[in-house]
Amino acid sequence: MNTKSFKEKLEIEKKGLEEELGQIAIFNTETNMWDATPDQDMMGEIDDNDAADRFENFEERSAMVTTLQARLIDINIALGKIESNTFGLCEVCNQPIEADRLEANPAARKDKTHMNEQ
Ligand SMILES: [Zn+2]
């Protein structure tokens, strides 16, 4: 399989994800995970209501970090598979993932038959 265009797509998406994460999180080199940062605009003096708002905001931020990080991990896995020549194979049955599925999502880890399996 020619993986060049997939690799380019994955690397572009990876860069975008890292930029997005960089705005709301900081990379923890001890855990190799992104940690959500508090909202800088909200760091001034706050009353109790604001504190509740800020918490909600941080919760949203953490949820976004979790989502972006999960996608980044999938992309890193896909890039690793390109390096080891196992890219595009379903992780469940080891058969090639459908071309249209890979086009839509180059980080797909399973084919259409197994995409909903854990
Ligand atoms: Zn499969």
Image (spheres, helix red, strand yellow):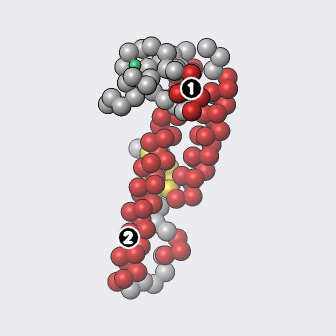
| Ligand 1 lies under 8 Å from the Cβ of mark 2 | no
Quadrant for ligand 1 reads top left
2 above or below 60? above
**Residue under label 1:** 100
* Residue 73, image x, y percentages: 47, 37
Q: CA distance from mark 2 to mark 1?
A: 41 Å
* Quadrant assignment for the C terminus: top left
Q: Which residue bears the numbered disc 2?
A: 55
Q: Which comes sooner in the sequence, label 2 or label 1? A: 2
Looking at the rendered structure, the kind of residue marked 1 is: Asp
Residue under the image location 49 percent in, 68 percent down? 39
Can residue 8 be seen in the rendering of this structure?
yes
Instruction: Assess disc 2: are there few (<14), some (14-19) or many (≥20) residues with their C-alpha within 10 Å of its C-alpha.
Output: some
Query: Tag 2: residue type?
Result: Phe
> Picture coordinates of residue 58 (x, y %)?
42, 65
Disc nearest the viewer among 2 and 1? 1
The residue depicted at 54 percent of the width and 33 percent of the height is: 105
Residue 85, image x and y in percent?
55, 15
- Callout 1: SS: helix
28 or 15, nearer to the observer: 15
